[in-house]
Image (cartoon, rainbow, N blue to C red):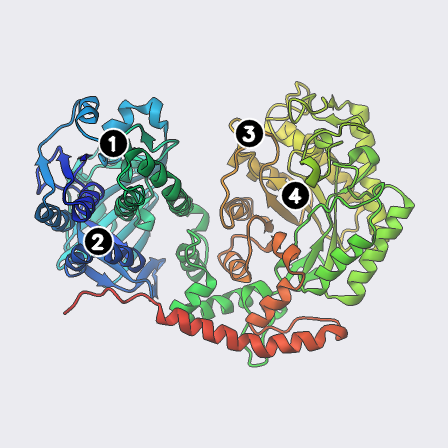
Amino acid sequence: MRIAVVGGGPAGLYFALLMKRDWPQLAVDVFERNQPDDTFGFGVVFSDQTLDIFRAADAESYAAIRDNFAYWDDIEIHFKGEAFRVPGNGFCGCSRRSLLMLVQARARALGVGLHFGAEIADVAALRRDYDLVVAADGVNSRIRENWRERFQPETDLRPNKFAWMGSTRPFDAFTFFFKRTEHGLFIAHCYQYEAGRSTWVLETDPETFAKAGLDAMDEARSAAFLEGVFAEELQGHRLITNRSLWRNFPMIRCRNWVSENVVLIGDAKATAHFSIGSGTKLAMEDAIALHGAMGQAKLDVAAGLKLFEAQRREEVEKTQHAADVSLVWFEELKRFWDFEPLRFAFGLMTRSKAITYDNLALRAPEMVAAVDAMVADGLGPLARRRRDGSPVPPAFQPFMLRGMRVENRMTLSPMCQYSAQDGLPGDWHLMHYGARAIGGPGLVFTEMTCVAPDARITPGCTGLWNDAQEAAWKRIVDFVHAHSAAKICLQIGHAGRKGATKLMWEGMDRPLPEGAWPLVSASPLPYYPESQVPRGMTRLDMDRVKAEFVAAAERGLRAGFDMLELHCAHGYLLASFLSPLTNRRDDDYGGPVGNRLRYPLEVFRALREAWPREKPISVRISATDWAEGGLTAADSVAIAEAFAAEGCDLVDVSTGQTAAESRPVYGRMFQTPFSDRIRNEAEVATMCVGNITTVDQVNTIVAAGRADLVALGRPHLADPSFVLRGAAWYGVDIAQPVQYRPGQDQLMRNTPREREELQELKLKARPGRHAPRS
């Protein structure tokens, strides 16, 4: 069997040496266009976890790498004259040239054929001569670009500009510097990679780049300019250049990694932003994964390549998602510039979701204690403290909405139960809302409660258009108030074009085969091709539906609800006006976002007038449609600002479900960045939702200023006492009915011991195990 590797970077060399080590009979050749000691850039960085993987893959090259690395444990953040040092991170830096020399030496010793100065012009010929061709030719991969129709790459060229430079200034921590100049904001990502050498990745936004005139500067002038910007931080040292050209980072994804006997690895197939230090990590882990897949397939090329893509893709996409979130944080730096330095530093540390509140508490307990104090101090006398005076964690701090006090930041998310009869909530709903309210959330949201029979999504949806429904809801509200400390919010809505559909478990959003009712929407567009075509709303329709919303709100007030939420998300009636995908009107209610807002704002104003001034109203919106031509980031901020100006107290930030063609990007806390944007740009309180599963994540979100309340759906379905268990974990006493006090007491006794045992295990596994031998 013959293997050709195109590209002599870390990915290609590492794969070659692993294959030759385990199957010496193989002919393995590496073709590299540059010379063996040519390299660009300065240092590379790996985490302790990555070094664990290297050690397991090849102990000999691992030992050589470890003994040539600069090792550090801390991250240091400099912002507005303050410095924050966070230990327990475990990073290693190495010269990129040294890494290549080490891996080259190992490959050469094993018998890999290394061919330098070898430009591969004809990949088709290579495919004929070799059984397997590995394209490890980097971010500008010629193989990928020449076969675009096969690999189907997508490149997202990010807006920020960056340049890779070096310096002789030493560092004992991975260090971030943030500087404001007359031109704008600059960032330096810095780390030492060998004695007397450090990497400086300089980054700025496109406006600052243009204003500073950097587009007209060559390498030397650019370095001199940045030496002025970071004069204090350089401490008398100079910046060093090595093809240090300003670039935009390309986020590359490929629909296919394999075509016949050719496979892409490393930056050729996928890139991840430098802010999480993952480029070389991904490349070398690709090599390990491809080697493992070929072994599993007993060197059957087709089977091995199929295994590689199937087994490796999820991990790569998870890393890319973390990198996406991280890079956006740096791109949106202006949004956080007015934060207090501690919150800024906490937000930086937790930006990619790899580090959370609990994780940081193990690494830097003093910092987390300061964060707790910062959140509590911001609440003044409203803040909750333990008997010893220490503040409770952010998730358990109260929040005020007008005159309503919410006891903690966790809410029961609105979740349709599809279990009503003719809109009437029954015993199921009493159990559902009552049990979860007793479990401890500060605020309980009802499912979308429909304002009229023809406003329902399904025949099983609840409603509030008659006296019997009002009495049934009052029974639920009274139970919640009598047996818990939770407040309860009535969410009202109208299904619009997504109405007259089957129950969720019978075929979500699919039309009823019989018994359907007529539908209205902003425009006569069906949700699915087979769905009912709604009638575009007339002015008479608008007046009728607005009156139905007001009537439902008035019934909700009589039922005793503490708060009201208007549903303007998920493609339902009011959302259909907001999105350009569903609003094709040519009158005053269509076109630019201001016109698309017109009718939802009319409904909101009528509700605000009918609802008591001391009671809050929130609005649920979809901040993105996850589809081309849909709502933009600027649209969602403008929508939030418009509702806030009319008296909205909280924006409940969800996403998507507007159109069948939407393609959400899921992940942990995947919708939180949209809440972050709206909260800190529209300057309105927000509630976030979406794959948030732990109180730790809630603490992280609230402390970082990404949302004020956090809605949890499925965690509450699985565990009605979700908040109670979280309170016991953090040693916080919350209200419980006297009947349930013994259970709470047991939790409060046992959980702290379990927490301590888990923390001890985590501390034993802390980074520090790969420090070079002295």
Q: CA distance from mark 3 to mark 1?
A: 31 Å
Residue type marked 4: Arg
Alpha-carbon neighbours of circle 2 within 10 Å: few (<14), some, or many (≥20)?
some
Question: Is 169 or 493 nearer to us in this picture?
Answer: 493
Residue lying at 20% horizontally and 44% vertically, measured from the top left: 19
Task: Tell whether 351 sits left or right of 616.
Answer: left
Does any portion of residue 712 appear in the rendered image?
Answer: no
Q: CA distance from mark 2 to mark 3?
A: 45 Å
Q: CA distance from mark 1 to mark 2?
A: 34 Å
Of labels 2 and 4, earlier in sequence is: 2
Q: Which mark is residue 620?
A: 4
Does any portion of residue 468 appear in the rendered image?
Answer: yes
Which residue lies under the disc numbered 1? 140
Residue type marked 3: Gly
Task: Tell whether 479 sits left or right of 286.
Answer: right
Residue 28: percent from the left, percent from the top? 15, 38
User: What is the quadrant of the C terminus in the image?
Assistant: bottom left
Which residue lies under the disc numbered 2? 231
Residue type marked 2: Ala
Task: Tell whether 716 sits left or right of 300.
Answer: right
Q: CA distance from mark 2 to mark 4?
A: 47 Å
Is 88 rendered above or below residue 679? below
Q: CA distance from mark 3 to mark 4?
A: 17 Å
Residue sitting at the far right: 467
Residue 699: percent from the left, percent from the top? 53, 61
Q: Nearer the viewer, mark 2 or mark 3?
A: 3
